[in-house]
Amino acid sequence: MMLFDKARRNASTIRQLGARAIEEARKAGVPAFYVDPSLGEGIIKEMPDGTRHRLAKVEGEEIVVESFGPRSRG
């Protein structure tokens, strides 16, 4: 449980690192993959244009379950 306690204490820093990683992927022209419970269960694939897709694996294939527009920047 100590790991989870540390993660909770450092949640802000972890979010900042995640946002930077997504931005770096966008600049490199490649998708970023992450989880975001606010968008539902599963992996989110964020494309360089900001479009986001919630994915599922079906028989080894990546299937788009739902698509979202770019996140608001602010």
Image (cartoon, rainbow, N blue to C red):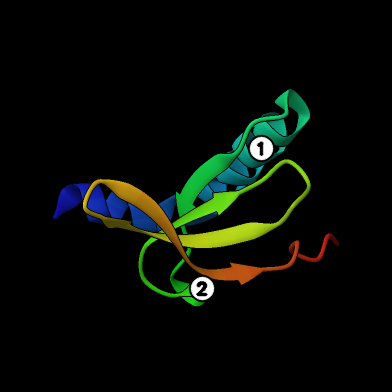
Determine the residue positioned at 78% across, 47% down: 49
The quadrant of the picture occupied by the N terminus is: bottom left
Where residue 16 sits in the image (x, y, percent)? 62, 46
Q: Work out whether residue 25 or residue 74 is closer to the camera in this orientation and state it.
A: 25
Q: Identify the disc placed on residue 20.
A: 1
Where residue 29 sits in the image (x, y, percent)? 72, 29
Identity of the residue furthest to the left in this view: 1
Q: Are there few (<14), some (14-19), or many (20+) residues within 10 Å of tag 1?
A: few
Determine the residue positioned at 55% across, 45% down: 13
Q: Quadrant of residue 40?
A: bottom left
Determine the residue positioned at 63% across, 59% down: 52
Q: Which residue is mark 2?
A: 39
User: Label 1's element?
Assistant: helix
Give the amino acid at mark 1: Arg
The quadrant of the picture occupied by the C terminus is: bottom right
Q: Is residue 66 left or right of residue 59?
A: right
